[in-house]
Amino acid sequence: MNTQNITRKLTSRYKNISELGYRTDFERDYTAILYSHSFRRLRHKTQVYFFAQSEHISTRLDHSLYVASISSIICRNLFEKGVRCNPTLAMAIGLGHDLGHAPFGHSGEKILNELTQEIGGFKHEQHGLRIVDKIEKPSAELPVIGLNLTLATRDGIVNHCGESNENVLSPSDIPEYNDVGKRDVFPCSIEGCVVRLSDKIAYLGRDVEDATMLKPKIELSLPARVSSIIGHKNGEIVDYFVKDIIDNSSEDEIKLSKDASELMEVLKQFNYENIYNARELQDLQEQIEYLIKITYEKLLFIIENYEDNIQKYRYNRFYCIKMFGEFISDRKKLYFSEEADIYSDSSKLYLRIVADFISTLSDRFIIQAFSELHIPKAII
């Protein structure tokens, strides 16, 4: 496939846009994500630490901005080396790569996955594609097209998988537009591969920095091999891995050197042992999972009784139920026309709707919903 045909395929959309308004295709994707509701809510979604009092602890929005920045810098430098890549595409994928995260990060994802096994489970990568394709910007007039992003941006979002262990990535074959997300593969673009590695770079260093703010001894206990070669600050960690990727990548593959890969694995193992699996986070995780499970079951009970009668939701005395009804109302065509036949019975459709709604909520909103639904209030 020649370069022109590759570009045409990567920039294809569900619905063609004849006028981009002085923007390139990927600038249009970037701004569509930037102004989306899902992106805004990331400011109130957990990255690692729940309920952090310090305003300097990372949120999921901060992390997405870091990934977009790191990815675009790598791509610009690779382009200057002669590698055909587009920094704006990398920024768009980086900005949108975590839109599918549930409230409370991986803890929320874990419990939603357990609750939705009947409909295939919940993975934030796959759900990110669903967010941009169907949940954002529902339309009553046209088929539901979400943000109407290009194939390349959608593919990068669904295949970003920052928890993977591979540090050498070669782009996969470009799928058809409607086949994006149906295979478990590396991204089909150089830019998508850059984002997949940048995701790890962004969270490993910054998570150490966040942990150090809360527990200063964390920084002092970094493995000697990491601190002596790379350093112990987030900026030093990011700088080391970014330079290594630029020096070792080519038109055919995005890669870390053998030494850098080994150091990344050492740092990743350190983070899991000292941060992600720390006792205090594990204790909170059990509470978070309970909170989401109880709220999920309550909303499932509501939809089984109200079904698609939006007026019943609107007349409910609880604000969160009213919002649940508005969420369904905006997507009635999606759920009760386009997807009704996908599920064997209405109970599975309702599981899908509740999971979609819960996934969009911020940490703060689901706590408010739980409180409203389950904690008695004084009658004044």
Image (tube, grey):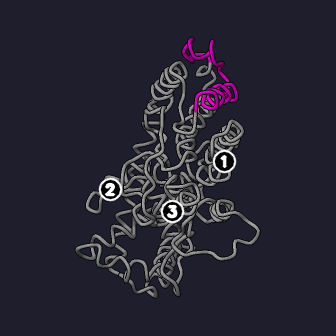
Contact flag, marks 1 and 3 (Cβ < 8 Å): no
Which quarter of the rendered picture does the C terminus lie within?
A: bottom right
Res. 57 in view: no
Q: Nearer the viewer, mark 1 or mark 3?
A: 1
Q: Which residue is mark 3?
A: 360
- Rendering coords of residue 313 (x, y %): 45, 81
- Badge 2 marks a residue whose secondary structure is loop
The residue located at (35%, 81%) in the rendering is: 307
**In terms of sequence position, does the residue under pointer 2 or pointer 1 come before the other?**
1
Within the magenta stretch, is there residue 136? Answer: no
* Side of 319 relative to 106 (left or right): right
Q: Nearer the viewer, mark 3 or mark 2?
A: 2
Mark 2, other Cα within 10 Å: few <14 / some 14–19 / many ≥20? some
* Side of 53 relative to 145 (left or right): right
The residue located at (44%, 82%) in the rendering is: 332
In the image, farthest residue toward the front: 2
- Badge 3 marks a residue whose secondary structure is helix
The residue located at (44%, 58%) in the rendering is: 127
Q: Main secondary structure of the magenta part?
A: helix
Q: Amino acid at mark 1?
A: Leu
**In terms of sequence position, does the residue under pointer 3 or pointer 2 come before the other?**
2
Q: Is residue 78 above or below residue 32?
A: above
Q: Amino acid at mark 2?
A: Gly
Q: In 3D space, how far apart are the residues under numbered discs 1 and 3 (Cα atoms)?
A: 19 Å
- Magenta highlight range: 220-249
- Rendering coords of residue 99 (x, y %): 54, 56
Mark 1, other Cα within 10 Å: few <14 / some 14–19 / many ≥20? some
Q: Which residue is mark 1?
A: 65
Contact flag, marks 2 and 1 (Cβ < 8 Å): no
Q: Which residue is mark 2?
A: 121
Q: Is residue 353 above or below residue 1?
A: below
